[in-house]
Image: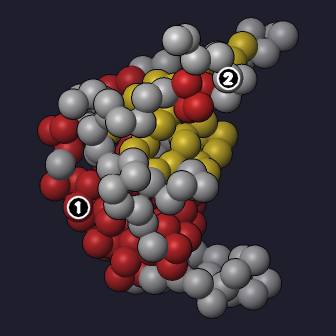
Amino acid sequence: MTEKKMNVESFNLDHTKVKAPYVRLADIKEGQNGDRIHKYDLRICQPNKEHMEMPALHSLEHLMAEMSRNHTDKVVDISPMGCQTGFYIAMINHDDYDGVLSIIEQTLNDVLTATEVPACNEMQCGWAASHSLEGAQALAKGLLAKRSEWTDVFA
């Protein structure tokens, strides 16, 4: 029996066949003026086996969103997945996969040396009480330790 194709790309991905951590190109959208958005799936945790705790995930989101822009002006957005297993990274007019891996690696190295979570206050954040710099750094360290595996998506 063939499953119905869903509108959301990740809903068509067999999550039982992937092996985290990995970075995969999930989608490309082209605008009417030729701009191209490349959406990358940065999977940190194995789907349905583990997940990131919210304070660590939240802080990693803040850190990556702020620090990635020190390495490129092509980042459109870095968004956490609702399943708490990874992030989506949207880049504009940047189709260099190895370059994206390098930006992620540089950003995660920045996370390791951070002394605070950016915008971790009630004025700049909608849930300022839910942060963990130490948790974010542990996630970054674990992800960097498996850097050689990032290009292997499927088990």
Which amino acid lies under the numbered mark 1 shown in the image of this protein?
A: Gly
Query: Is 44 left, or right, of 149 in this rendering?
Result: right
In the image, residue 115 lies at what x, y percent?
40, 83
In primary-sequence order, the first of circles 1 and 2 is: 2
Residue 64 in sight here: yes
Q: Nearer the viewer, mark 1 or mark 2?
A: 2
Residue placed under numbered mark 2 in the picture: 6
Which label was assigned to residue 142?
Answer: 1
Question: Measured along the vertical axis of the image, is residue 111 above or below residue 13?
Answer: below
Question: Measured along the vertical axis of the image, is residue 126 above or below residue 140?
Answer: below
Determine the residue located farthest toward the right in the rendered image.
32
| Mark 1 secondary-structure assignment | helix
Residue drawn 75% across and 77% down? 126
Closer to the camera, 52 or 123? 52
Instruction: Name the colouring of the figure.
Output: secondary structure
In the image, residue 65 lies at what x, y percent?
57, 57
The quadrant in which the C terminus is found is top left
Residue 70 in sight here: no
Closer to the camera, 2 or 42? 2
Closer to the camera, 109 or 22? 22
Query: Is 16 left, or right, of 30 in this rendering?
Result: left
Badge 1: residue crowd in 10 Å (few <14, some 14–19, many ≥20): few
Badge 2: residue crowd in 10 Å (few <14, some 14–19, many ≥20): few
In the image, residue 76 lies at what x, y percent?
66, 40
In the image, residue 135 lies at what x, y percent?
37, 77
How far separated are the C-alphas under marks 1 and 2?
32 Å
Which amino acid lies under the numbered mark 2 shown in the image of this protein?
A: Met
Residue drawn 65% across and 17% down? 4
Residue drawn 72% across and 77% down? 125
